[in-house]
Image (cartoon, helix red, strand yellow):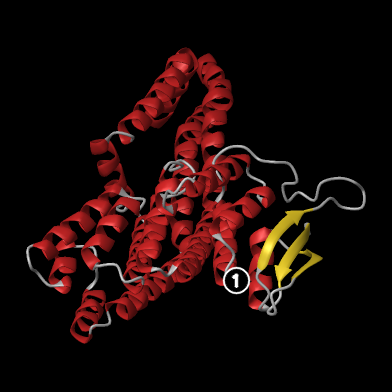
Amino acid sequence: MPLFDYRIRTPDGRTESGRAEAENAAALARRLNAGGTPPVGIESVTDPSGEGTGAGLRMRGGRPRHEDLELFCRQMHSLTRAGVPIVRGLQGIAETTHNARLSAALRGIAESLEAGRELHAAMREHSAVFPALLINMVRMGEDTGRMEETFEQLSFYLERERETRQQIKQATRYPIFVMTAILAAIAIINVVVIPAFAGMFERFDAELPLPTRILMATSAFTLDYWAWMLGGMVAAVLGFRQYTRSGDGRLWWDRIKLRLPVIGSILERALLARFARALTMATRSGVPILEGLDSIGRAVDNAWVADRVVHMREALERGESLGRAAAGTGLFTPLVLQMIAVGEETGQVDDMMEEVARFYEQEVDYELKNLSSALEPILISIVGAMVLVLALAIFLPMWDLAGAAL
């Protein structure tokens, strides 16, 4: 397990150092925070053999990982709670982070703050490093003077996002492996197996069944035009990526993703949980709901859901209630709409939206646990269809030839 050196701030304000093992820096930060000693800095160390622990001793390039941003928010929460000036805190975090791009961004932000700029404006200059939701939430925290709570909520939000992504990866690992094996098997059958049987069947000069002729024709086409097929697939992938990066293309693809069998409902519930959690943070930070929806609409990582949020905001501007505006989006279930209506009537929209987030998160957890079971019948059907095609295409003519010989 990776080894880390850490510095903590004790309840009486002193700074102490130590060394501990943890899965990663974020896990160690959570452990230290739970013990009432917020970390000031965390650095990975080498093991006794002199080799790296695998925790990222050298600076990494590229965009910061989700774990890097989560640790950044936890450290900022600890520093603001301890009363450390933001510029000094950013400089300290820049020295301890293992992502070169994040470190450079934090140093640039510290310089901008020293020049008199606001934190959210300085962070917006590094929008390639920090997500829009994080920047907008920092702006809300500055407007309300509740930076400590803002970073605490952001760290919890990012932690929940990381756990959901890990669950999705774990649940889809087996289906992806099976589908890869199936595609490899189809390629081997077309390139190796079918041509071998085709030569044997041609020597008998017998009329072959229709499934056999189709499979042989498919194999011959693949062998003759494989270069064109490969080029066509590459062009299709590049064209698809280019189209989905455009405004209309992204809106179309993000909507299609939510309608995919089995996993579409999981993605939709995860996005709605993210929306509800972000709206909870915004309302608890004292941000007006219209301004909060505007920020969340830009921050949600799905163009279709963002478009629905914009319609929801427009309905509120026309004077409609929050419940009616939410119902007009077509995103929420009747139970969730009822919860929103109750929150609006009681003046506790933030509490109800937190319950909505928990509801969707529980739904996501349940569906992820059953994802493999839901995909197994589909995978079995695909494998069964392959076996059936092979049986009809290969064994039928062999049986015919054996019957003719007898």
Q: In the picture provided, is 377 more to the left or to the right than 78?
A: left
Q: Which residue is mark 1?
A: 82
Residue 132 in picture, x, y percent from top left: 39, 50
Q: In the picture provided, is 289 more to the left or to the right than 183?
A: left
What residue is drawn where x is 74% and y is 64%? Answer: 7
Query: Compared to 243, does 265 lie above or below?
Result: below
Q: Residue most toward the bottom?
A: 346
> 10 Å neighbourhood of mark 1: few (<14), some, or many (≥20)?
some
Residue 348 in picture, x, y percent from top left: 27, 82
Residue 206 seen by the camera: no
What residue is drawn where x is 80% and y is 51%? Answer: 53
Q: In the picture provided, is 189 more to the left or to the right than 54?
A: left
Please state which amino acid type lies under the numbered disc 1: Ala
Q: Residue most toward the left?
A: 318
Q: Residue most toward the front?
A: 115
Residue 50 in picture, x, y percent from top left: 90, 46
What residue is drawn where x is 39% and y is 60%? Answer: 137
What residue is drawn where x is 32% and y is 67%? Answer: 279
In the picture, the quarter occupied by the N terminus is bottom right
Query: Compared to 380, does 403 lie above or below?
Result: above
